[in-house]
Amino acid sequence: MVLIESVAPGSPCASLDIHGGDRLISINGREISDVLDYRFFLCEKKLRLLIEKPSGARREFRLKKGEYDDIGLCFETYLMDKQMHCANKCVFCFIDQLPEGLRKSLYFKDDDSRMSFLFGNYVTLTNMTQRDVDRIIEMHISPVNISVHTMNPELRVKMMKNRRAGEVLAYIKRFADAGIKLNTQLVLCPGINDGAELEFSLKELGKLYPAVQSIAAVPVGLTCHRQGLYPLEAYTPEGAKKVIDIIEDFNIHFMWYHGERIAYPADEFYLKAGIPIPDADYYGEFAQLENGVGLWASLKEEFLQALNDELLLEELSGQVPFDAKISVSLATGEAAFDLLQELVDELRKKWHNLNIIIYKVKNDFFGESITVAGLLTGRDIIAQLSGRELCGRLLIPSVSLRREGDIMLDDTDLDQLSRALNVPVTPVPNDGEELLRKILNI
């Protein structure tokens, strides 16, 4: 049963004797324990709601609705339950590398299959029960995003410090057999799960195609706050190239049999190896953008398409003429600097009177090995841009803000950033046309 916090006015349930403080026991005789149960059984058009009053008395209410209509019950949390904490102690865990003094929520290690369903989070499967697996299969929740790391059961136990880490790999096969689509990720650590182990993991996951629709290989992220943690090394250019070569070799054979690729190195591997990032066509449907796979290619393609769209250019130039003076500054991580410079150079071919300065912000907060824009902090931006020419406006990557789009990892909010630098600050999503519009101040 779950506690009802309130009932939305004007909703189907508002006309019934259901109120905040009541508990929802079941829908059509099926017990409700969390958001997955609720959303799944809510799709039926005729509902029987079993409600328990604060007095303990139970009543059944009946109503009719459209298949996808909400009924107006509001709950304390979106999960309608407590979020599940990670049961692993992974040797590469990024949260263990956070410095002290950040907001409490950043230290929470989530490993909740419901978050995968709701927000696309990746889960390790180690705290899932057979009932959880059965329920996902019954509801045909798809896709499920899985942090695999290795398909070697013994190595997985060693890497994740959880005795169940190896045995739960069997869940992946169950999901695949049931037709559940799977996106998988491998966080690679030099000398541990790359090399021959990476070849093995790719081969085993490839056997589960087409259920496994993508495999992302992501390099371990190492901050400067690793005192007392498992000794790990960052990828060298040579090591990064070997990872790319292994994945490309797998893709060549896989495409021979299946006609498509499913394995992708994260953009960081190409940058570290000094190898050009593939064009957008390489990434298919961009299934792994959240893992930093194809971000560069996607942004570049969208930006250049916008610059070559005659109808869009006519619209934009009607608001900002090609000879208009445009002044703006951009702040980004070290990894994305060259791409942004390339895109700005293309923009100058259309709008000639540009004053655009791109600032490469070094990540002093987490350490020089962290170069991605998503881990920039407000204090680094302020420290490195104070007193610099900011052209009256500053654009920052929206991925450096939390999901709500208001504060950065170090709790710096947009107003604080704007006041400290004395310019308006605008976040920009990883969208080529939006980047163009924000540069033009449209």
Image (cartoon, helix red, strand yellow):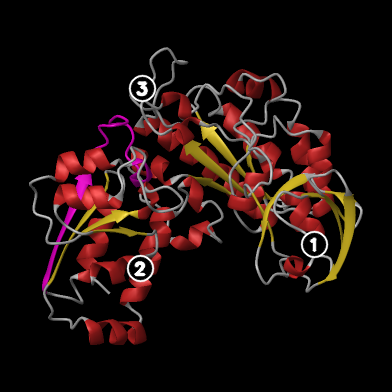
Indicate which label's residue lies in the foreground, 2 or 1: 1
Q: Which residues are magenta?
A: 353-375
Q: CA distance from mark 1 to mark 3?
A: 55 Å
Q: Is residue 356 magenta?
A: yes
CB atoms of marks 1 and 3 within 8 Å? no
Q: Nearer the viewer, residue 93 or 267?
A: 93
Badge 3 amino acid: His
Quadrant of the snapshot with the N terminus: top right
Nearest to the observer: residue 27 or residue 296:
27
Q: Is residue 183 visible?
A: no
Q: Earlier in the sequence, mark 2 or mark 3?
A: 3
Residue 58: in sight, yes or no?
yes
| Residue, disc 2 | 434
Residue located at (40% from left, 54% from top): 405
* Three-letter amino acid code at the position of disc 1: Asp
* Residue wearing tag 3: 225
Q: Position of residue 355 (x, y in %)?
A: 11, 65
Query: As drawn, is 125 to the left or to the right of 189?
Result: right
